[in-house]
Image (cartoon, helix red, strand yellow):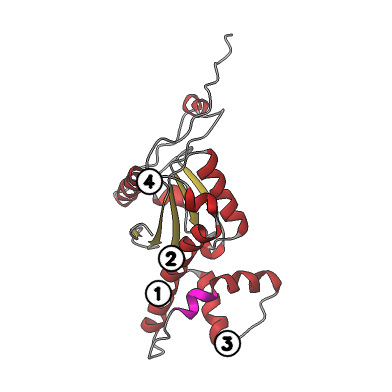
Amino acid sequence: MAKKKIKAPKKNTLSAAQALRKLKQGNRSYLGHDPINYQTEQERGDFWNGQEPYAAIVSCADSRVSPEIMFNKGLDELFVIRVAGNIATTEAVASIEYAVAHLNTNLIVVVGHEKCGAVQAALDVADTPTDLGYNLNSLVAHIAPAVAATPKPAGRTKKAQDQRLTNAVKTNAKLAANELRERSKIIRTARGVKIVWAYYHLVAGEVEFSDYI
C-alpha cells in the first residue's frame, strides 16, 4: 500500500479583516442553524503536519460558550484559549504570541459572554469583600479593574443588576483585549495583526463585535 504523502506545514494567509468576515459569516450560519461541517479523515490528513488558524480566540471556560460552535468552524480554523473570565493570563498571552509569530494568525478576538460567573464573582467580592482562596482571589483580582470601571446602578432591581453585569463583562473583554497588546511586544509590533473584543448572547446565539482596538 502506497504511503500517503505528508504535505508541508501551512501558515494562515488571511488578513485580520478577512478572518473577521469569516467569523461573522460563521456566526450568521450558526444563527441560521446550519450544521458544522466536521472534516473527514482525508481532510484531517491535509493538516496533520501543520496548522493555519486564521483567528486566535480568548474565551471564557464556561461550558455554554464554545467558539467553534458559535462561529460554526471546524478543525484548523481557530486557535482557542479558554480561561474563566476570558482574562489575559501569562499563559494566554504566550499562546497568542505563538499563533501570531509562528502561525501567521492575524486576528485576535477576546469573547465575553452573557451571565459570566467569573465577572459576577468579581462584582460580588467588590460589594462584599470575601476570601475565595488563593487561586480564585487571583482570578477575581484580574477582573477587578473592569468592575471598578463599571458604575453601580442607582437601584437594586434585577434588571439594574443584570445590566451592571453586562456592562462589566463588556468592559472586562475590552480591557483584556487592550492588555494583550500592552503586555506583548510580539503582538503589539506584528504587522497586520488586529484585535477586537466581542460579546456572546447565550440564548440568542449572536456575537456582537467591537471595532478594532
Tell which tag, 3 or 2, sits nearer the viewer. 2
For mark 2, what is the residue?
174
For mark 1, what is the residue?
167
Image position of 126 with respect to 17: above or below: below
Q: Nearer the viewer, residue 7 or 184?
A: 184
Asked if the stretch drawn in magenta spans residue 145, the answer is yes
The quarter of the displayed image where residue 112 is located: bottom left
Residue 35 horizontal side relative to residue 86, left or right: left
Quick one: label 3, few (<14), some, or many (20+) residues within 10 Å? few
What separation in Å lies between label 1 and label 4 (alpha carbons)? 26 Å
Q: Earlier in the sequence, mark 3 or mark 4?
A: 4
Which amino acid, mark 1? Asn
Tell which tag, 1 or 4, sits nearer the viewer. 4
Question: CB of mark 1 within 8 Å of CB of mark 4?
Answer: no
What separation in Å lies between label 3 and label 1 (alpha carbons)? 19 Å
Asked if the stretch drawn in magenta spans residue 195, the answer is no
Which amino acid, mark 4? Ala
Secondary element type, mark 1:
helix
Q: Earlier in the sequence, mark 2 or mark 1?
A: 1
Q: Which mark is residue 128?
A: 3
Q: Position of residue 138 (x, y in %)?
A: 64, 71
Image position of 116 with respect to 161: above or below: above
What separation in Å lies between label 4 and label 2 (alpha carbons)? 18 Å
Secondary element type, mark 4:
helix
Q: Residue at x 57, y 59 (%)?
A: 83
What separation in Å lies between label 3 and label 4 (alpha carbons)? 42 Å
Tell which tag, 3 or 4, sits nearer the viewer. 4
Look at the image and give the residue range highlighted in magenta.
Answer: 144-149
The quarter of the displayed image where residue 166 is located: bottom left
